[in-house]
Structures are given as structure tokens and as C-alpha cells.
Amino acid sequence: MAIQTERGQLRVLPGGAELDWPYAKGHLACNEAIHHEALIASTFEESLARGYIEEEASVHAIMACAMHPHLLWRGGPAAHRAAFPRLSLPADRESQHSFPRLLRPSPGVYPVVDSLALLDQLLEAGAGIIQLRIKDIAAADQETAVRSACRVAEQVPNCQLFINDHWQAALHHGAHGIHLGQEDLLAADLSAIAQQGIRLGLSSHSYWEVARALWIAPSYLACGPIFPTRAKAMNWIPQGLENLRYWVAVSDVPVVAIAGIHAGNLMQIAQTGAAAAAVIQAVVSMPDPARAYRDLQATWLRASASSSPLPSSWDQAPPAGWPARPTLSPTHS
């Protein structure tokens, strides 16, 4: 069976479904799919009617098969986590990678900086995880910056330094971790990263990107944008706390919240069960970035100590809006 629209198609095959949409190509695994073609078709149509695009509707349709006879729109976190499918990369269906876990599974505030000076300041302030994100830099300068950052981090015990995007330089200089956007996955050598024992952080913004990330099994999954942000132009719909709770519930790797996070909403982020919150302006634009980091981390620790896990009642009566709301408007698809 095939479901087709002007944007592409989903083909049901033994073992799952092949997706061929602009943003999602690959295999969604589900042994039950071939036996539930009518359920796949009806769930796909209902998902589109609810405002999701085809890529998300495809994940919903395969999830519905795995949850059968549970209803997708009423099942709670435990059912969704068990049923959430994995989306392989095109032509890489059988590959499996193993990335190391984070040294601290819930590190808290995760500063993202664009200079070695800020990196040094925040490591001195006690940052347990930090990311160097330098854009629009010449190759020679990129190599120098990554080498210098890795040397600085080597002097800090248990420092978890992630290099954004520049994975070749990070590999060459033995970085602790690499952070990639999903647009970088086809170019990056995931096998080399895994074989060298380097941790991998992966950005994800939607059902299909989370499905792909969970197939890769990174060291952490960065989900967002949670709130509107000026750090990066994007078409994604700000997801809010409810979507963040959903990604935390279905993910089997630590979830990092990204975008628009500051002192005024950090406590709410910590109370969702997220492992960390990536921050940029809330630290780097402050007069004293080191003090700003320490204050935010103290807020995170207080909130984490007072938070409780997802209510068990969600398995029977999940909150309004469950599962996650649409993440990309059909007008941008």
C-alpha cells in the first residue's frame, strides 16, 4: 500500500514503511505495519486534519500500528514510548552506532558560546557541559579554534565540551563531544565519531527528527525551539513546555531543551524532567557571564530537587494536547 500526496509518499512494506517526503526519507520500522493498512491510512488522514504535515502524519500512522488496539490520541507516555518508531537514514537501514553516555546524565544549564574567552570564563565558573558554536569561520581559523578549545577543556576534570558542526576538526583534536543538526547527518562520518568514543548531541525539532535521532541513539537529544528565539532563523513552531514533556517521556536518551530559555522560564524547564537547558543570551549577553551561569545553575538545582516525575495517571488520562502539537506549519512544508 502507498499513501501519496503532491509532496511525496509513504509505502507500507513488510517490517515497516518507507518514507519519501521532502524532510523525511528512510525506513520507519514496525513489524505490525503490513497487517494494519486501513489503520495507517485513517491515522494518516486524521493527523493531517489535526494540522500536522505528512512527515509527522507518517510517524503517527506507524505509531498507531504499534499501539494497536490503543488509540494514538488517548494513549499515555508509557504506550507512546514503547511505540515510538525509529527512522533510519536513507541507504543506511542496517547501520548501528554506539555513542558514549554523558558523564553526568542531568548536567543542568548548558551554555553555548562563540568564543574561547567565554569558554574559558564559564569553565572556570564550573560549567559541567558547554558547547563551542562558531559560525561563518574560515577552515584554518576553525581548526585553530577547535584545537585551542580542546586544549582548554583538557585542563578541566570531567569537562564535557561539545563542538558544534565542525566534526572533522573535533575528530582530529579528540573533542569530548560533537553537536550536529540533522541537516549535517548525511555528511558527517557517524561511524568514525562512534569508533573514536566521542559523544554525540543531536538537534531535533519534530516527530520525524526525534524518530531519526532515536534510531541513531546519540548521547543526548536537543529538542526545540521550546520558546521563540533570536539566535537562529527557523520556521519551526515554538513548542512550549507540553511538547518538551512529551519528548522527555518518549526518549530513551537525555533530552536537552533548546531556544528562548532564560532565568524567567528555567525553573519550568527543569520541572519537565529535561536533563539540561541550552542557553545563549541568558549567559553571554550578561555583564558578568560567569555569575549569570552560576545563578542559573543554582536555579536549576533548586527546581530539579523539588520536581517530581511524570504523573502515573498520564498513562490512563494524559493531559489535553497529548501527544505533541504540530512542529512545522503546513505553510512552510
Image (spheres, helix red, strand yellow):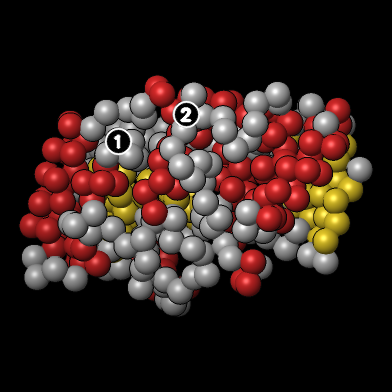
Residue 300 picture location, percent across and down? 19, 43
Judged left or right of residue 29, residue 199 is: left
Residue 279 picture location, percent across and down? 28, 58
Q: Nearer the viewer, residue 242 or 228?
A: 242
Judged left or right of residue 8, residue 154 is: left
Q: Nearer the viewer, residue 309 or 178?
A: 309
Locate the N terminus and report the quarter of the image it occupies: top right
Kind of residue at badge 1: Ser
Mark 2 sits on what residue? 317
Kind of residue at badge 2: Ala
Mark 1 crowdedness (10 Å alpha carbons): few <14, some 14-19, many ≥20? some
Q: Is residue 191 visible?
A: no
Locate the C terminus and report the quarter of the image it occupies: bottom right
Q: Look at the picture and state if 173 lies above or below 62.
A: below
Q: Could you tell me which residue is drawn at 68 percent across and 55 percent down?
A: 49
Q: Look at the picture and state if 182 lies above or below 72.
A: below
Q: Could you tell me which residue is drawn at 49 percent across and 45 percent down?
A: 321
Find numbered disc 2 in the image and state the secondary structure of the residue it sits on: loop
Mark 1 sits on what residue? 106
